[in-house]
Amino acid sequence: MCDTVEPMATTEEPSPAPTTAPIDTEDPPMLISIVPITNDPCPYRASETFTPCGEPSRCNVRPNLLIATGGNLDKYYATTDGLTGAKLKTELNSIIRGHRQMSYGCVWTALAQVHKDKNNDDNLIEFYTRRSVSRLRRDCGSGKNDGNCWNCKHLWTKSKGFSKQGQDAYTDIHHRVSSDKSVNGARINHSFMNGGTPEQECCLCKQGDNFTWEAPDSVKGQIARMVFYMDVRYDGGDGDGDGTGDLELVDRGTAKDNHLGYLSDLLT
């Protein structure tokens, strides 16, 4: 049954205690850079770790990230002043490629916190359907199309440039979201493009005839920012030495290469 909801608030953000200057809430930047500041092997964890459909175990580790925002951004991006085009992209790549990578398990735990339902601490908000589901219903069921369970989805699909779990892009949380398993299975590796037929379990999602996927309006901006980040962060090929391809947004459909479409729709 399709029971997608469209809440007033569309972004679930972590809210760690600030460790630097106060965040400027009156004029927030479009981009927030998250910079690890400790040597903890799991740089962002909720108060619980999870096993599929099981009971949580407590780890009691506070979020230990520095949120670079407000005045901090001036320093963080200082070397980009006056740059445009390819030079700007190259410099941004140099700045953001230094972030610490999470393990695959840590990504799951982080998403349970990042997408936490503000009205129910035991639940999270699924990215596409916007439904509130128990955080314990992680990757449960017997198949990829089982509904009412959530999965850890790559917005830039792994078949397009990084198919191995050890590659940095695979566990980069900047493009990972919590998605209903059946909706995840419906999107597969389709490029983003407006138009198509409503998906059965996500009325505001649409599948196009040419292997395309339209997300609800409420998350289109987030998707665009996430995949533009991926284009910049993994620009130029295997700079990380792990076999990741040169990720690039294009204005066409793509198969199993390093490209993702459709650029014109992502820009609107």
Image (cartoon, helix red, strand yellow):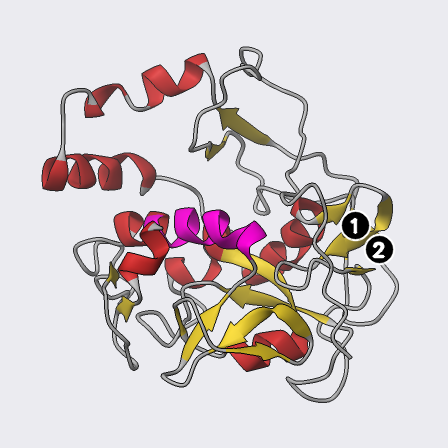
Task: Report x, y in % for residue 144.
Answer: 64, 84
- Tell me, for residue 57, which label it has, or none: 2
Find numbered disc 2 in the image and state the secondary structure of the residue it sits on: strand
Q: Residue at x 54, y 14 (%)?
A: 24
Q: Are marks 1 and 2 in contact (CB under 8 Å)?
A: yes
Inspect the image, locate mark 1, and give the three-letter code of the amino acid beneath it: Glu
The count of marks equals 2
Q: Quadrant of the N terminus?
A: bottom right
Q: Quadrant of residue 128?
A: bottom right
Residue range of the region highlighted in magenta in the rendering: 217-228
User: Which residue was labeled with disc 1?
Assistant: 48
- Name the side, left or right, on which 156 lies relative to 48: left
Q: Is residue 130 above or below residue 100?
A: below
Q: Is residue 263 above or below residue 80?
A: below
C-alpha gap between disc 1 and disc 2: 6 Å
Q: Earlier in the sequence, mark 1 or mark 2?
A: 1
Magenta region includes residue 238: no
Magenta region includes residue 226: yes
Is disc 2 surrounded by few (<14), some (14 to 19) or many (20+) residues within 10 Å?
few
Task: Report x, y in % for residue 215.
Answer: 52, 63
Q: Residue at x 64, y 45 (%)?
A: 10
